[in-house]
Amino acid sequence: MSIPELERDAPVADTAPPPSSAASKDSSPPHSFRPLIMRLHFYAGILVAPFLIIAAVSGGLYALAPSMEQLVYRDYLHVDSTGPAVPVAEQVGAAQRIRPDLTVAAVRPAASEGETTRVLFTDPSLGESERRAVFIDPATALSVGESVVYGSSSALPMRTWISQLHRHLHLGEPGRIYSELAASWLWVIALGGIYLWVQRYRTVRRARARGADAARLFTLDRSARGRARTLSWHGVAGIWMAVGLVFLSATGLTWSKYAGENVSELRTASSWTTPTLNKKLAATPTDSSGSDGHDGHDGGHTPAAADPGLLDRNVSELDIVLDVAASNGVTGAVEAGIPADAGTAFTVTETRQPWQFSTDSIAVDGANGTVTDVQRFADWPLAAKLTSWGIALHMGLLFGLLSQLALAALAVALLTVIVRGYILWWRRSPTRGTHRVGRPPVRGAWRRIHPVAAVAVVVGTVAVGWFVPLLGLSLAAFLLVDVAVGAIGRARANRPPSANTAVPQ
């Protein structure tokens, strides 16, 4: 038996043949999951692939965005001046003189020579999670420019634009459905593809001398031609990138709206959440409201109501606070949160940087330099650590340029696999040229599964569909469409021949 014959999928037909006919035309062994997974992989690949293409292109760009940002905004992020840095409080004061209309919220001091200090302000005119940043030369305390930054990573406009494209196509909350749908199906398509590719490998190996084709599971079959060669490229690339795709799917779902809420509830119930730093100081005569004043987004207390004199005093204590943090091991690239009231402590948190696997944080009373709380990354629950590392890796930050290039390569590889998948679909025909496009695998997949296994599959699918709602809803939609197509096909097959149809003599 030739390899192309072995690689040929089950016969294609839109009509529903009798059970015995469907089974006889499928070479899969009895009680095999292959027909079911083949049909699921086929429909999911065809219908979800457009969403995956958008996610791959935007995700590949986002992975490279941190390095691109360093080039595009180099005049904001880097300076040529040398010499000792002036006190951080003076740098913040210089930024306040440039934007006296805004309330200072935090500062990211230059971590090394040649970098700028980023002074962050709350700006009511900006959107959620956005702040105004003034970039200060630490050696001269002069401004080199200002810009809007976004999120905990303090991303600049280009990276923010790419991030929002990847997240919701700039459509707001409704647009998040696209990315969640892609993340919900990506792991299903990847794992289903692995199963099908391994099953094909075993079939080929049994047809040849034992061990003669062992390397074909992970390497391209260069002797194949036509559709068989396309299938080889599709399968080999897919199996090499499957782990990466499942990782991106899992970490992407943690950011999603519906599945993400279920993940958060599970983490909370299991005590896997990231510990929070207690910023509250003991009650003082000037602070009896109990509000923490954090970033001015708590609704009950805003930076605009802060006492300017108190805020200036807090700014003057910055250098002492940073020295206390450094003496307690919170060093390197940090962000210091500046309280707007007397009842809130300063916070100093290590920011995500390449090759940094822990992010400690500390709360300090600026009035006397007392440490009021410390959160050590080493004390986090394992699940919280894994989540932090996963997010950093998904964003292309954990291993710096190395992880960015790897993620970009994974995005390109995914695009090639999708394109070859569509080519396989286009060529899926028993006879070349008989159909404009390919047809789905043979029906009757459920009849090939043992009843007990079928029940287990249904129960598992319902459970997964509940936890990942868009996966469950879209799968139900696929099934309804498939049933409707099958019914139409059966109706056409059972339709009596037209009176104008010529009867063979």
Image (cartoon, rainbow, N blue to C red):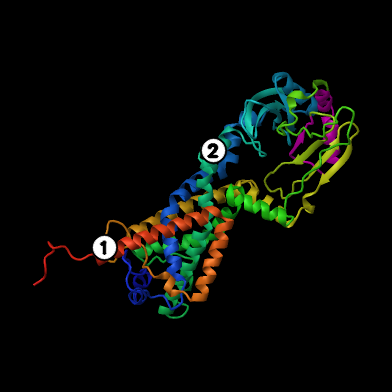
229 vs 341, left or right, is left
Which amino acid is tagged 1? Arg
**Mark 2 = which residue?**
172
Q: Is residue 502 above or below residue 19?
A: above
Asked if residue 384 is among those painted magenta in the image, a careful observer would answer: no
Q: Is residue 446 above or below residue 50?
A: below
Residue 276 is labelled as none
383 vs 447, left or right, is right
In the image, farthest residue toward the left: 505
Q: Secondary structure at mark 2?
A: loop
Residue at x 78%, y 53% (from the top left corner): 378
Which amino acid is tagged 2? Gly
Magenta residues, as a range?
310-339
Label 2 crowd (10 A; few <14 / some 14-19 / many >=20): few
Asked if residue 325 is among those painted magenta in the image, a careful observer would answer: yes
Residue 386 appears in the picture as rendered: no
Query: For the residues carrying marks 1 and 2, which lies nearer the camera in this image?
Result: 1
**Mark 1 = which residue?**
492
Closest to the observer: 43 or 359?
43
461 vs 319, left or right, is left
Q: Is residue 95 above or below residue 442?
A: above
Separation of marks 1 and 2 at Cα, in angstroms: 44 Å
